[in-house]
Image: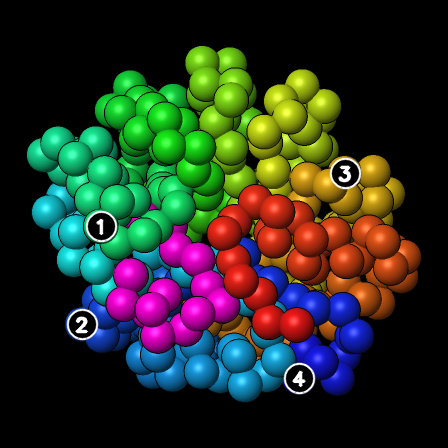
Amino acid sequence: MFSDLTPLPVIDSHVHVFPPEISDALQKWFETYAWPLRYTGTAEEALERLFDNGAAGAVLLSYSHRPGIADQLNEFTAQLIKRFPHTAGLAAIHPHDAHPKDILKRAFDQFGLCGAKIHCHVLKTAPDDPALFPVYEAVLERGGVLTIHAGREPHTEGYGIDVRTITGVERVENVLERYPSLKMIVPHLGFDESERFYSLLDTFPNLYLDTTMVLGGFFDVEVNSGNLIRYADRILYGSDYPNIPYGMCTEVDSLLALNLGEDTTRKILFENAASLFPIKARS
């Protein structure tokens, strides 16, 4: 349990939730193209497990793999937020939805969501594609947060294209130059370009990175403890739970093993997410 591992509270800033029919298909996709999943079942079961294991809060994410389903996904996320009060939620949106700004307005005003999630690999769309500009503008207008899987990794043939050709640090920089006030989180510490993403933090004060699946040793990625300490104000713990191949506490345990100091560890595990998202975290 999180509470057994550390006296510090833990907010998971990257938790995936989908309605059952989409979740079932997604789990099969992961088993075929990505990695074997440690957890299966419904989103409700996943969140009950997360909080039973001591999580203080969670940010719930889904993403649209095709136009026309964003409202359904956003309403589902809103229902989970009502059921699990220590959560916040980001909206799904597809760049080819009809009237994406109207969909996001409903997500914010009607469903109580606080930003948006974009998965460039799934969308087969570059982060600096103008089709996504209305999404950025809608999030920016509301002071929301954008979590965008815009780094090159992890890639898999299951996406149907070489996603490394449409993603990466330079394309993210293009977006930030156009929208420097946009609060943006790039998952996976931006690997395999982590050093370059860290450098962007020096230039763009509204850019953040999250740790999804980088700390636990599943990928062959070297974690630079010095950068975690230097940029502790701009890094959030996130897990990709429940779509992970190991136990939910694995990466928290790995983070603690780095011995970064209590101040740095508290910021990454809790304080940064608590400041960025409207979460009423458990004490």
The residue labelled by disc 1 is 110
Q: Are marks 3 and 1 in contact (CB under 8 Å)?
A: no
Rounded to the nearest angstrom, the CA distance separating label 4 from label 2 is 29 Å
Label 2 sits on residue = 21
For marks 1 and 4, give the CA distance: 35 Å
Q: Earlier in the sequence, mark 1 or mark 2?
A: 2
The magenta segment is 78-91
Between the residue at mark 2 and the residue at mark 3, the CA separation in whole angstroms equals: 39 Å
Residue situated in front as seen by the camera: 280 or 7: 280
Horizontally, residue 253 falls left or right of residue 142, namely right
The quarter of the image holding the N terminus is bottom right
Q: Calculate the distance from the C-alpha at mark 1 to the C-alpha at mark 2.
A: 24 Å
Q: Earlier in the sequence, mark 4 or mark 3?
A: 4
Q: Residues within 10 Å of mark 1 (few under 14, many from 20)?
A: few
Which residue carries the number 3 mark? 231
Q: Position of residue 219 (x, y in %)?
A: 62, 58
Mark 2 lies on a secondary structure that is helix
Q: Residues within 10 Å of mark 2 (few under 14, many from 20)?
A: few
The residue carrying mark 4 is 1
Under mark 1, the amino acid is Gln
Q: Earlier in the sequence, mark 4 or mark 2?
A: 4
Residue situated in front as seen by the camera: 229 or 157: 229
